[in-house]
Image: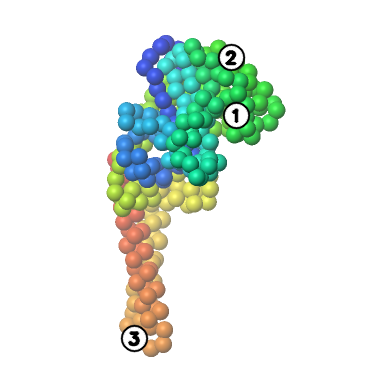
Amino acid sequence: MTEQPDTASREERTAVLVHVDAPQLPFLAGALQRPFTAVTRDGWSAVLVTDGIDPVALAAAGDPESLAVVLSSDGESRNLRVCPPLSALDDQREWGAQLDELAEATALRWGPAETDAAAVASIVSLCDLDPAATARLENYARTPSSPLLLESVLQLLGLPVIAAKIVEGQRELEDVEGVSHHEPRGLGLSLFDSASVEPSGSGLLSRVQRAYVRRPGILLALGGAELAVGAGLAGLAARGGRGCRVLGSVSALMLSDAAVQAALYAAVRARKTR
């Protein structure tokens, strides 16, 4: 079924697109000390902004080496702001003040307020767009407000368009694959939440984690093997002789890791049954 944009005026929705994958979201909730709902795609997360969440603080809490995008729509007016990476800011000055200063310089607006031409140039520089992409962005900035503009700009920037679909009301969160809700939790619980969720990225670590989340039996098999090896090494260490201390240390490490694998298996299974 073709998705139909919601063109009627409604309450404004705001989302922040940050370079944070699903395993990092529990820590993000802890850093913000606020609950939130997010959708992950290709190593990025579209976080729905609710009361009490500062969009700029949320953008800054993501990958410090990557830009973030704050976008909003009420069905008539639309805004898209590109926040530069924190690593690109002056580390001698407070980052919040610098981002506030850049607010208008990196924002595209459609509706009553018009986009400043300098903002397009700033975004072109931040995103290192080539001449063809620059021309397209300039054209989008001049285009009257419409439901597909935010999606078009994100696509041009090479970013997941799911954030635009959410703020435009094209997709309800409960119907979106990869949606998750996060509450601020302690570090230990956040670690297990992080390790038991399926990443959306394509890196090696993401592929490894995705494999064991989809097939948690891998964890049980690995833990069982470590348990057997650890017990065997413990037996050898108990006999004494040269190297017994080393064998004992390795045995303890293997047995501890086996316990971690078992706990992680339980966490993954518990998440699957929710």
Say what secondary structure mark 2 lies in.
loop
Q: Residues within 10 Å of mark 3 (few under 14, many from 20)?
A: few
Say what secondary structure mark 3 lies in.
loop
Instruction: Say if 263 sits above or below 87 in the image.
Output: below
Q: Residues within 10 Å of mark 2 (few under 14, many from 20)?
A: few
In this view, the residue farthest toward the right is 131
Residue at which label 1 appears? 122
Identify the disc placed on residue 143. 2
Q: How many marks?
A: 3
Instruction: Say if 52 sits above or below 72 in the image.
Output: below
- The quadrant in which residue 37 appears is top left
Say what secondary structure mark 1 lies in.
helix
3D distance between C-alphas at marks 2 and 1: 18 Å
Q: Amino acid at mark 1?
A: Ser
Please tell me which of labels 2 and 1 falls first in the chain: 1
Percent of width and height locating residue 117: 61, 20
| Residue 178 seen anywhere in this rendered image of the structure | no
Q: Residue at x 54, y 32 (%)?
A: 159
Please tell me which of labels 1 and 3 falls first in the chain: 1
3D distance between C-alphas at marks 3 and 2: 80 Å
Query: In screen coordinates, is 159 left or right of 179?
Result: right
Q: Residue at x 38, y 14 (%)?
A: 10
| Residue 172 seen anywhere in this rendered image of the structure | yes
Q: Nearer the viewer, residue 44 or 223?
A: 44
Query: In screen coordinates, is 131 left or right of 192?
Result: right
Please state, as top left, top right, bottom left or bottom right, where the C terminus lies in the image: top left
Residue at which label 3 appears? 239
Q: Amino acid at mark 2?
A: Thr
Q: Residue at x 42, y 51 (%)?
A: 212
Please tell me which of labels 3 and 2 falls first in the chain: 2
In this view, the residue farthest toward the bottom is 241
Q: Amino acid at mark 3?
A: Arg
